Image (cartoon, rainbow, N blue to C red):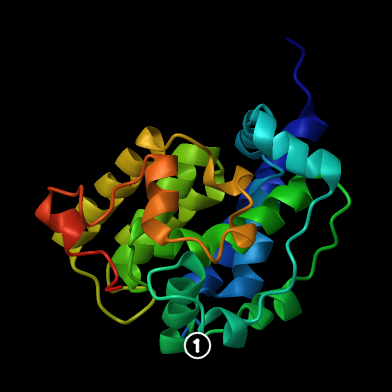
Amino acid sequence: MRFDPFKTATSVFNIAKSISTFQVILNETSGDPHLLQNVFKMEEALDGTPHGKKSILFQMENEDLRKLWEERWMPERIDLNKLKILPEGSLGRLYAENLIRQGFSPDALLDLDPYPITNQKEFLIHRTWQVHDLAHALLGFDGNSEGELGLQAFEYSQTQSPHHLFMIFGVLFRFNGLFDGGLDFHQSLLSIARGFNLGVQAKKMLNSVKLEEQMHRPINDIRNELGLPTKENTSQKYIEASFYDF
């Protein structure tokens, strides 16, 4: 195979850009646990590497996700005030209560998102962050640093997107905690292990499901359909302890 210096230089540039952006993320002192602006920059850069391009191809092999792209499907803008009055135990109610408790609004994501959707890469970046907080509710991962690490592991096992690995290993190397100023190393490893396990056992790729159209449904019904544990069918103590109350 002939050496392609331009391709190699492009890959190195994207990796260097990602590392530079991630250094900013690790030093972030903002109260925003999602660090959206810099995370978007890092994800875009990493998706330009060979690993990132393979991830895009891998995700587009999923029939349901590919259909969303072909439809150019986009969820309606989320209204937390409407969701928080849905029946108790519904996906939308739990999702809204979690975000309200954290002082976070999906409007922040929409307002900070700098990218239009003109290709598959941009579509997948958007879809990951549209589903991110819904995944918190469905999987029971808390919004602290350990919960975020677990969710990153789940998302990597489902999408193979390299930016999830950057987040996992970067936070572990930093060790003083990215999101809340403290990190329980033992609990973090358990959370990561649980995330990988859930990603493998899930019946569907979460990003391929129109969860935004199922906000009114009981969350445990959705979990059962996706092959995810509920409080009723969970046996491991560390999994049970990480579920939100609902």
**Whether residue 216 is visible:** yes
| In-image side of 212 versus 231 (left or right) | right
Give the x, y percent position of residue 54: 64, 30
Q: Tell me the SS state at disc 1.
A: loop
Query: 16 or 48: nearer the eye?
Result: 48
Q: Identify the residue shown where x is 60% and y is 46%.
A: 209
| 217 relative to 93, above or below | above
| Residue at image mark 1 | 30
Q: Identify the residue shown where x is 79% and y is 42%.
A: 69
**Whether residue 53 is visible:** no
Q: Identify the residue shown where x is 54% and y is 51%.
A: 163
Give the x, y percent position of residue 82: 61, 83
| In-image side of 71 versus 42 (left or right) | right
Q: Furthest residue to the right?
A: 118
Q: Furthest residue to the front?
A: 87
Q: Within 10 angstroms of label 1, few (less than 14), some, or many (20 or more) residues?
A: few
Image-quadrant location for residue 212: bottom right
Query: 155 or 168: nearer the eye?
Result: 155
| In-image side of 85 versus 175 (left or right) | right
Give the x, y percent position of residue 159: 55, 40
The C terminus sits in image quarter: bottom left
Q: Identify the residue shown where x is 59% and y is 48%.
A: 207
Kind of residue sitting beneath label 1 = Ser
Query: 3 or 228: nearer the eye?
Result: 228
Image-quadrant location for residue 142: bottom left
Count of all numbered marks drawn on residues in the image: 1
The N terminus sits in image quarter: top right
| 185 relative to 235, above or below | below
| 201 relative to 216, above or below | above
Image-quadrant location for residue 144: bottom left
Query: 23 or 97: nearer the eye?
Result: 97
| 183 relative to 152, above or below | below
